[in-house]
Image: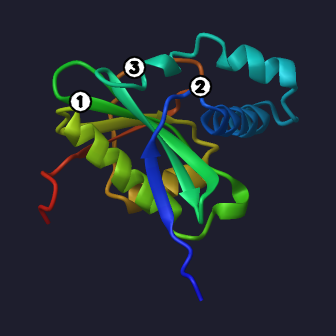
């Protein structure tokens, strides 16, 4: 029997798989925030000029996670000033959660940040995204003071990125 595996490949944010995953991500976080299903028009508006184009070298990286070859999730890294990078748009489709993909996706994105020269990773999220916050803490992220502001930011996390292979 073949073993199903996770893969994490760099991909432009405008490919069909990346676009569908970004739409699913926005749909989920917006619907949870508004406490009602987001409309297609609201999703379109939210993704318009959202800065995702920066998630490509030399300013960032975007990965598509696949489980057994099927698009299952995504995430990005955006270089900030100095040697910091921001973790952003982390998402796994519900059908793929609980299979170890979040941990592996974070590993892949941290490796991508290191390759871009980052030595620290930061992120912001909302208090209601409890599952995401739990994953970040389990992966070594700790709450930090705010490094940015915005309407959908309630809590900030950071983590020093050890060199690849360091324990």
Residue found at x 65% / y 31%: 19
Asked whether the residues under the numbered discs 2 and 1 touch, taking CB atoms below 8 Å apart as contact, a structural biologist would say: no
Of pointers 1 and 3, the one earlier in the residue sequence: 1
The x and y percentages for residue 110 are: 30, 47
Which residue sits furthest top? Answer: 49
Return the x and y of residue 139 as percentages of the image width and height: 37, 59
The residue lying at 71 percent from left, 32 percent from top is 23
Question: Which of labels 2 and 1 is toward the front?
Answer: 2
Please indicate, yes or no, whether residue 77 appears anywhere in the rendered image.
no
Q: Is residue 7 left or right of residue 83?
A: right
Q: Which residue is mark 2?
A: 14
* Whole-number angstrom distance, CA of label 2 to CA of label 3: 26 Å
> Who's the residue at 39% across and 25% down the image?
56
**Closer to the N terminus: mark 2 or mark 1?**
2
Label 1 Cα crowd, 10 Å radius (few <14 / some 14-19 / many 20+) = many
Seen at 42% across and 60% down, the residue is: 104
Q: Residue furthest bottom?
A: 1
* Residue underneath mark 1: 84
Is residue 51 rendered to the left or right of residue 86?
A: right
Check residue 148 in the rendering and tell me which mark sits there, or answer none: 3
Question: Does 139 appear above or below 57?
Answer: below
Element carrying mark 1: strand
């Amino acid at each position: 029997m073949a073993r199903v595996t996770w893969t994490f490949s760099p991909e432009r944010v405008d490919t069909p798989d990346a676009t569908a995953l970004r739409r699913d991500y926005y749909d989920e976080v917006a619907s949870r925030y508004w406490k009602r299903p987001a409309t297609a028009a609201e999703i379109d508006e939210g993704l318009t000029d959202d800065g995702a184009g920066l998630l490509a070298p030399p300013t960032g990286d975007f990965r598509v996670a696949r489980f057994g070859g099927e698009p299952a999730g995504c995430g990005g890294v955006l270089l900030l000033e100095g040697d910091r990078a921001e973790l952003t748009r982390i998402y796994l489709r519900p059908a793929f959660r609980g299979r170890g993909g979040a941990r592996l996706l974070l590993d892949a994105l941290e490796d991508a940040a290191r390759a871009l020269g980052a030595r620290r990773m930061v992120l912001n999220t909302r208090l209601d995204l409890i599952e995401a916050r739990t994953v970040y803490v389990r992966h070594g992220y700790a709450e930090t003071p705010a490094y940015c502001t915005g309407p959908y930011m309630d809590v900030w996390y950071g983590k020093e990125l050890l060199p690849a292979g360091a324990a």
